[in-house]
């Protein structure tokens, strides 16, 4: 059993510092053997450079199926930007369109996601941290805002499913976030911990509903949010009660559960402590984004290896991605762009 664990990757996704790996980064990733990697705008200059960086990252761990993630939601959260990549609209644009024509909005959201997937797949990026299923509430911090795919649970579920379908049709896995719901947070969890005092019944009926509707999706990302009605002491990411009872049982999510970025200020303690707490609570994989070598070393020392259950979840997700990827050859990008323009123009 110990030997088996020793051969498994560490249960962490790491970022890197720039558009190409440094020698210290190469050596560290080869030694640490993280599950995968995440890219940000600092890593993305042009298509050839990104493809080279992805190949470099995969080479350090010796696995061509290591997940490569990115946040390419559209609007204000997109790491790939013009002139080399399409400027995709924010999710809120489709939510607005749905007020007049939900069927048209659904098709437009699916097409937009399919176009995003085409950009990502061409670079070797296999996982997109989208859609945002959080349902914003009056008075909430704008960190979610127009990133949300819907202002009601039903619309969030409907348009969220369309986004997931579009991404998967292009061979890219979606990550529904931020489970079990960030829409009531009155502060930005990048800066401090949000405290949500809504009752369990309110959370069940509203915040958790879109995630329950899409519980069959392959990946999900946790919320660094405290829900006082369930666990008043710990944010969801480090709460065994929320991850185990709410997300896995009540919501019914069975896919890969990745933490939001461990370096966000909603969490406390050292980076290694945060990683260990997230894993102990039930996260399959921890996420660390900023590429800081000292922080990554601390996490690598404390995060542990993938469990067998996590490997099975990852394998099922990757099989789903590869099946979708096999069907992409006859897709017409130009026709998709024209159709999306017609749908949005009609709006």
Image (cartoon, helix red, strand yellow):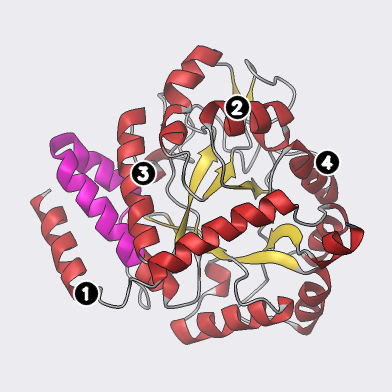
Residue that badge 3 annotates: 160
Discs 3, 2 touching: Cβ within 8 Å: no
Q: Position of residue 143 (x, y in %)?
A: 49, 41
Q: Earlier in the sequence, mark 4 or mark 1?
A: 4
Please identify the quarter of the rendering in which residue 22 is found: bottom right
Q: Secondary structure at mark 1?
A: loop
Q: Nearer the viewer, mark 3 or mark 2?
A: 2
State how far apart marks 4 and 2 are (Cα). 24 Å
Q: Main secondary structure of the magenta part?
A: helix
Q: Earlier in the sequence, mark 3 or mark 2?
A: 3
Q: Quadrant of the N terminus?
A: bottom right
Q: Position of residue 257 (x, y in %)?
A: 61, 46
State how far apart marks 4 and 3 are (Cα). 34 Å
Is residue 118 one of those drawn in magenta? Answer: no
Tell whether 204 sits left or right of 240.
Answer: left
Q: Secondary structure at mark 3?
A: helix
Q: Position of residue 71 (x, y in %)?
A: 50, 58
Q: Secondary structure at mark 4?
A: loop
Q: Position of residue 13 (x, y in %)?
A: 67, 60
Please identify the quarter of the rendering in which residue 66 is found: bottom right
């Amino acid at each position: 059993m110990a030997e088996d664990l020793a051969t498994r990757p560490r249960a962490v996704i790491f970022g890197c510092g720039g558009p190409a790996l440094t020698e210290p980064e190469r050596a560290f990733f080869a030694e640490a053997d993280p599950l995968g990697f995440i890219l940000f705008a600092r890593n993305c200059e042009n298509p050839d450079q990104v493809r080279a960086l992805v190949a470099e990252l995969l080479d350090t761990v010796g696995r061509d199926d290591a997940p490569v993630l990115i946040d390419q939601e559209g609007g204000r959260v997109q790491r790939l930007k013009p002139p080399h990549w399409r400027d995709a609209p924010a999710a809120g644009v489709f939510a607005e369109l749905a007020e007049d024509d939900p069927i048209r909005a659904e098709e437009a959201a699916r097409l937009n996601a399919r176009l995003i997937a085409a950009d990502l797949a061409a670079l070797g990026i296999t996982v997109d941290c989208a859609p945002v299923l959080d349902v914003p509430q009056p008075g909430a911090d704008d960190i979610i805002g127009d990133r949300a795919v819907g202002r009601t649970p039903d619309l969030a579920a409907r348009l969220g499913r369309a986004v997931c379908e579009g991404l998967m049709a292009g061979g890219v896995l979606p990550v529904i976030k931020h489970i079990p719901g960030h829409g009531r947070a009155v502060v930005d969890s990048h800066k401090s911990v949000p405290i949500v005092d809504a009752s369990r019944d309110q959370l069940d009926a509203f915040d958790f509903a879109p995630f329950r509707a899409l519980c069959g999706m392959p990946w999900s990302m946790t919320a660094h949010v405290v829900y006082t009605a369930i666990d008043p002491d710990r944010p969801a990411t480090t709460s065994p009660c929320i991850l185990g009872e709410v997300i896995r049982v009540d919501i019914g999510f069975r896919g890969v559960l990745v933490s939001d970025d461990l370096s966000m200020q909603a969490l406390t303690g050292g980076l290694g402590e945060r990683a260990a707490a997230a894993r102990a609570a039930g996260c399959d994989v921890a996420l660390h984004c900023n590429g800081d070598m000292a922080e990554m070393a601390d996490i690598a020392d404390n995060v542990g290896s993938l469990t067998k259950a996590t490997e099975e979840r990852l394998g099922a997700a990757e099989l789903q991605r590869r099946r979708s990827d096999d069907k992409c050859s006859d897709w017409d990008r130009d026709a998709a762009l024209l159709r999306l323009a017609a749908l949005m123009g009609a709006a």
